[in-house]
Amino acid sequence: MQIVRSTAAATIAYVVALQLSSEPAPLTAPLTALLVVQVTLYSTLTTGIRRVNSVVVGVIIAIAFSALVGLTWWSLGLIILASLVVGRFVRVGEFVPEVAISAMLVLGVTQVTNTAWDRVLETLIGAIVGLLFNIVLVPPVWVGSAGESIEALARRMRLLMLGIGEELTTPTPVAHAAAHLHEARRLDNDVAEVDAALRQAEDSLRLNPRVKEEEGVLHRIVLRTGLDTLEICAVVLRVLARTLTDLAKERTDTELFPDDVAIALEDLLARVADTLVSFAVLVTTEVSADADAADERLAGELRAARAVRDHAADLLLQVVQRDPRQWQLYGALLAEIDRILDELDLEHRGRRLMEELDRHSRERAERRPRLSALRDRLGV
């Protein structure tokens, strides 16, 4: 769909530019439309503004240079240097090279002024066509795909926790424990990918006529806080894997835990792993009835996980009383599991959501004080 949208916008921009520009082949217009028609309406608008800005700045620099010097090797180097430096100050973002490109293309022709303003006109045509294209055919809202990526992250974390738990009931070589640690470290890459998908979803909600402002804000806050929680859990999971690796190094000659403790810890990690997935499902559920069911399921799994945690803690205490070696690693293991359960707790989740909503309201009031005062008077 995005390929079809980009192709259509570029073609329309070229047809319009043929009618309005004096250039025989106004390819700048379709090029601009191709770059401007992004995945979301918000990014289309911001990209169009930055691109037009970069072209105008480049054209002005070229006109200034053409009045002073001609095209030589040293003037070309000087205009490139000046364009890249100025591009950093005019806030054109990723279009800094476009400033230099525009300046070079304009400087290399004989009729500098005509070519310069034709290039500006073509850029404006491409930007306007691209923007109108996305206004008429509104891009999709990417909340669903962002939610799927959040759930996929939670399921990857679940599989890792299940793998760690299964090895607790058997002798654990240091190499196996270290492999789980490396896998836990790779979760950072997964979090970064989910963050990129979430940023795309947040952009798709901005300025989108399909979505009410407050609804878009709620979607952004719910998904963003959910990802923040999973990111914290991923960090704790990495620390948990580090703890078990240290314990494996200390106990190369024996099993990490007695059989009853290992079974209890395996059960505990399995329940925490399921709780992670239930949390992700709750975060990404939009329908009220489904959200209530996901809420009840998460609450039940949290209660079951805490009960198993208390049982495992009692067994670990008995082990420490008999053999106090590496007691600090046992305590660290329980503390890390407690931290994950606390992050997934519904009350903690509710407080975090309210804090983010309050912060957003304060920031909006500070940005638009008159509009906020009017809303207060109207009772909105």
Image: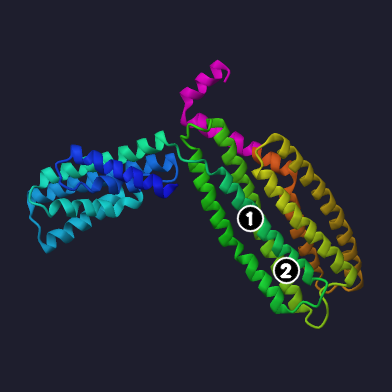
Judging depth in this view, the residue of 95 and 317 nearest the camera is 95
Q: Answer left or right for 80 relative to 210.
A: left
Q: Residue 21 in the image: x percent, y percent?
A: 17, 40
Of helix, strand and loop, which one carries label 2?
A: helix
Say few, some or many: other residues with alpha carbon within 10 Å of mark 1 (under 14 / 14 to 19 / 20 or more). Answer: some
Q: Residue 32 in the image: x percent, y percent?
A: 30, 46
Question: What amino acid is at disc 1?
Answer: Ala
Q: Which residue sits at x=68%, y=57%?
A: 155
> What's the distance in space between the residues labelled 2 and 1, CA to CA?
25 Å
Specify the quadrant that holds the C terminus.
top right
Question: What amino acid is at disc 2?
Answer: Thr
Q: Magenta region: which residues? A: 354-380
Q: Answer left or right for 241 relative to 313.
A: left
Of helix, strand and loop, which one carries label 1?
A: helix
Judging depth in this view, the residue of 97 and 139 nearest the camera is 139
Magenta segment includes 369: yes
The relative height of residue 352 versus residue 252 in the rendered view (above or below) is: above
Say few, some or many: other residues with alpha carbon within 10 Å of mark 2 (under 14 / 14 to 19 / 20 or more). Answer: many
Residue 200 visible? yes
Judging depth in this view, the residue of 10 and 267 nearest the camera is 10
Q: Residue 166 in the image: x percent, y percent?
A: 78, 69
Q: Which of marks 2 and 1 is in front?
A: 1
The relative height of residue 211 versus residue 103 in the rendered view (above or below) is: above
Q: Look at mark 1 in the image and give the residue it sits on.
A: 152
Q: Answer left or right for 276 relative to 315.
A: left
Q: Which residue sits at x=39%, y=44%?
A: 5
| Residue 243 numbered mark, or none | 2
Q: Is the magenta stretch mostly helix, strand or loop?
A: helix
